């Protein structure tokens, strides 16, 4: 029959192994997190740089997006639809 000291030592060893395994897993997750954050930052930088690229008319790409969204709203306005029996240019 094992002594109390032997049992305590076995439990301590099992706990130490568990802590070691969790530390390894935490290190792996920290490395993955750092890599994911780096990619995220790179994409954010790329988007900011694209947003500052001048458009052909001297504006920025933000201006182009605003203009496009306004054009889409104007085109799809129900009052601008063709009237019944009206002639549509070819």
Image (cartoon, rainbow, N blue to C red):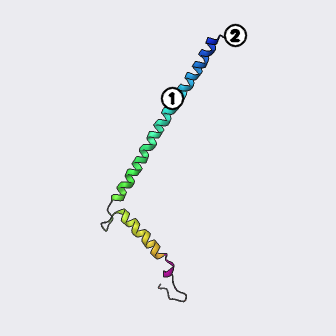
Secondary element under disc 1, as helix, strand or loop, is: helix
Give the residue at x 38% y 66%. 64
Front in this rendered view, residue 37 or 2: 2
Check the image and report above or below for 45 versus 12.
below
Q: CA distance from mark 1 to mark 2?
A: 34 Å
Look at the image and say whether residue 67 sits in the magenta stretch.
Answer: no
**What span is colored magenta in the figure?**
76-83
Give the residue at x 41% y 43%. 38
N-terminal of the two: label 1 or label 2?
2
4 vs 66, left or right, is right
Give the residue at x 46% y 73%. 73
Residue 10 sits in quarter: top right
Residue 17 appears at what percent x and percent y? 56, 23
Q: Residues within 10 Å of mark 1 (few under 14, many from 20)?
A: few
Give the residue at x 47% y 36%. 30
Specify the farthest residue to the left.
58
Front in this rendered view, residue 80 or 6: 6
12 vs 88, left or right, is right
Label disc, if present, on residue 2 of the rendered structure: none
For the residues bearing labels 1 and 2, Cβ distance under 8 angstroms? no
Residue 49 appears at what percent x and percent y? 35, 55
- Magenta residues: mostly which secondary structure? loop
Residue 83 appears at what percent x and percent y? 52, 86
Residue 61 sits in quarter: bottom left
Front in this rendered view, residue 7 or 43: 7
Specify the farthest residue to the right.
1
Residue 56 appears at what percent x and percent y? 32, 66
Label disc, if present, on residue 1 of the rendered structure: 2
Pick the quarter of the image with the N terminus: top right
Specify the farthest residue to the front.
4
Q: Residues within 10 Å of mark 2 (few under 14, many from 20)?
A: few
> On the image, numbered disc 1 is attached to which residue?
23
């Amino acid at each position: 029959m094992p002594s109390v000291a032997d049992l305590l030592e076995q439990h301590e060893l099992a706990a130490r192994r568990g802590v070691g395994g969790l530390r390894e897993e935490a290190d792996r997750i920290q490395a993955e997190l750092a890599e994911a954050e780096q990619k995220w930052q790179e994409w954010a930088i790329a988007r900011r740089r694209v947003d500052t690229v001048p458009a052909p008319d001297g504006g920025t790409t933000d201006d182009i997006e605003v203009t496009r969204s306004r054009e889409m709203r104007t085109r799809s306005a129900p009052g601008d639809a063709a009237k019944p029996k009206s002639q549509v240019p070819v």
